Every structure is written in structure tokens, then in C-alpha cells.
Amino acid sequence: MSLELTLVTRRQALAALAAGAMAARTGFAQSSSPSKPADWPIFRGNALSTGVAAAPLPDKLELLWKKTFPEVGLEATVAIVDGVVYAATLSGVACALELASGDEIWSHPIDQLGSSTAPAVHEGRVYVGDVSGKFYCLDARDGKLVWGYSAESVIAPSANFYKDKVVFGADDGVLRAVNIADGKEAWRFETSDFIRCCPTIVENLAFVAGCDGALHMVDLDTGQETNKVTIDAPTGCTPAVLGDRIYFGTSAASFLCIDWRQATIVWRYKAERRSAQFNSSAAIQPDLVVFGGDDRTVYALDPEQGNELWKFAARSKVDSSPVIAGDRIYVGAGDGRLYALDRKSGEALWTYESAGGFRASPAVYGDKLVIGNTTGDLLCFGKKA
């Protein structure tokens, strides 16, 4: 075995071990029990925002159920915990549904302007923000309000968790840490523009890729910035972390790999169409990073060097963020097509045509995938008995 291959293999092994250790410390370790599927509690599945499911899905997915929220859209990715789906709608409702049937367990009204925030679930509570700037902590069992917090600015991104705090950003450019116990603000960190990404958490750091054209690294114990990397354009993508590297795209058709320990850009990939924007958050594994673009393309790159592995041409823009499950990649497009792509080649292996476009991203629990569309349909796929 060559020295170069040995180093790469060692780096990948260390990255996988680091990811598992971080997930365990932040409360998002995948379940090792064969009887209980791994939860999908926040936007990208775990604190590291990797977008990777714990197990593969059936080769041929079938529609198991559809729940329609009339005259509204579902732009928020759902959370799935202990067989319950948690969703937020643009009509101003947060709700819980049985994953097995789609039957409603409870619903809770939020602001009438609605929410595009992916619910986040942690230790029996559901956290979701809305367009008016209100942030809700609800009891996961019955949907009753535990406490509320007002940011007085649109809350678009999902929350993440650190110790006894829930951490989230808003359109006023402020990253907030709020005490889980009582909803009181612990600290705030201010940037100069919108925060549209979910904060990714590693060790005691939050990573925020901002609309101010910078990647911010914030100490979660103090709320102070420890480092910053200037990027070439605004972004609302949630950074994906593997080992000591961070991956995300920007509105300037560039995709970045950043060494967060050194605070340096390792490589930069540029799309052929300079007008393209990357609004899709990446899914990452040691040998593959995959994301979508509004140039109707799904990209797969080598995480080490940024070399292009393959591209898939969709028929509409891809703002939905992909999920890797086994040897397939699942991603939605703006024309209502949901794709399963071969992980190695990018070939489309399965397609479902929905009545509405996809801005939300898939959430995976066991052998089921759930995703909402812009016409208000919440769709659950799996294998029929």
C-alpha cells in the first residue's frame, strides 16, 4: 500500500471516529439497537449536519401515505423521532404525525405567516421558529407550549443543541443561545447580515456560514467568535463537517472545503455556469460530498481534492439538500421530481413525480423517507407490506 493511500485511509478512519464521538457528545449518536431505527431529530440529521442516514432504504420506494395541508406549502424539512414525524407549515401550524399511518397526533398554532423552519427535537421537546420571529418550545407528547422566545426577526434556519442550550440564527444576523430550561437568552453573537443556515456544532464550537460572506466559528460556552474565514459570496447553506474539514456552497457558484482548525480554504470548486447558486446543503462521507444547484445539477465531488466525480442533470433547480442512504442518494427538485441516484455513478435509479416542487429535504427513519412539497403534500415512502 502506498504512503499516500495509507494517509488517506487513516484520515478517513479518524474522521469517522471523530464524527461518532462528536455525535455522542452532542446527543445525536445513531442508535446501535437493531430494533430501534436511528432518529432524524434536526435538519441534516445530526449535529455535524452530514445528511447521512444510518441505514439504506428499500431499492424500490413506494408511496405509503400522503397528508395534504390545503392551500399551503411545506418548505421545512421534517424531524422524525421515535416513530413520530414533526412538521411545520406555511399556514402557521406545527404538528406531530404517526410515521406508520400519517395520522395526526397533535397540532399547535404558530404565527399565521407560517414557518419554513425545520423542527428540531431534543429530550422530549420540539423547537421551531416562525416568520414573525417567535421561537417555540413545545412538549413533544401533546404539543403544549413549554415556553416562547421572541427574536423580532424572521427565524428561517433549524436549531441545534449544546449542553443545556438551544442555538439558532435569524434574519437580524444574530446567533442566539437560549436556555432549554426556561427560554431565557444565555448569549448572542452578531453578524452583519442574515443567518439562514442551521449552526453546525463540533466540540464547543458553532459554525455559521453567513449571508455576510464569512464562515464564523463561535465558542458555545461564551458566545465569542474564535475565528473567521472570508468566503467569496453570501450563503444560506448549512455547513457539513467531516473530521477537521467543513463543506458548503455559496451564491457565487462556488463550493468550498475549509480546514476549520487552521481557518484556511483547502480547495474551491467552481460551477461552469457562473450565474449558478448553491442553496442546497451538502451530504458528506469520507469519499463523497454531494449537493445540488439552481443550474439543474446535482454535483458529486471528492472531499479530499475537490475533483468532480460525476454530475446529474435534473429538469429543474435543486435547492433541496440531498441525503445519502446506503449506496443511493435521495434528492428533490423544483419540478416535483424526487430522485434516487446511484452513489457511485449518479445514474437515476428511481424517480417519483409529485404535484408540487421540492424545497424541503428528505428525512429518513429506518426504512422510510418523508418529504414535503410546495403544494402542501407531506409524502411518506417505504416498502408496502
Image (cartoon, rainbow, N blue to C red):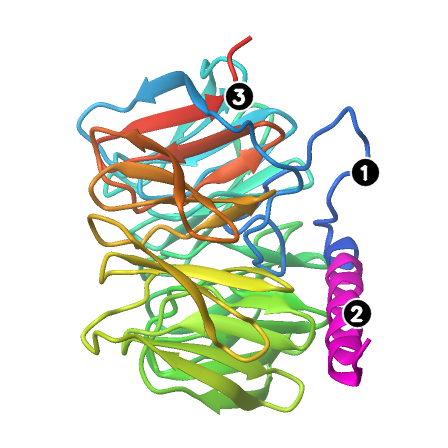
Magenta: main secondary structure equals helix
Q: Residue placed at 42% from the left, 84% from the top?
A: 214
* Gap in angstroms between the C-alphas marked 1 and 2: 20 Å
Q: Please provide percent x and percent y for residue 139.
A: 58, 32
Mark 2, residues whose alpha carbon is within 10 Å: few (<14), some, or many (≥20)? Answer: some
In front of the other: label 3 or label 1? Answer: 1
Q: Is residue 67 above or below residue 17?
A: above
In the image, taking residue 34 as reference, residue 277 lies left or right, namely left
Judging depth in this view, the residue of 159 and 345 nearest the camera is 345
Q: Residue placed at 36% from the left, 67% from the top?
A: 236
Q: Which residue is mark 1?
A: 32
Mark 3, residues whose alpha carbon is within 10 Å: few (<14), some, or many (≥20)? Answer: many
- Give, as a three-letter code, the residue at label 3: Leu
Q: Residue placed at 52% from the left, 53% from the top?
A: 344
- Give, as a three-letter code, the residue at label 1: Ser
Q: Please provide percent x and percent y for residue 144.
A: 52, 29
Q: Earlier in the sequence, mark 3 or mark 1?
A: 1
Question: Can residue 12 be seen in the rendering of this structure?
Answer: yes
In the image, taking residue 138 as reference, residue 75 lies left or right, namely left
Secondary structure at badge 1 equals loop
The segment highlighted magenta reads 1-22
Q: Looking at the image, how many numbered discs can be counted on the residues?
A: 3
Q: Is residue 198 above or below residue 336?
A: below
Q: Which residue is mark 3?
A: 99
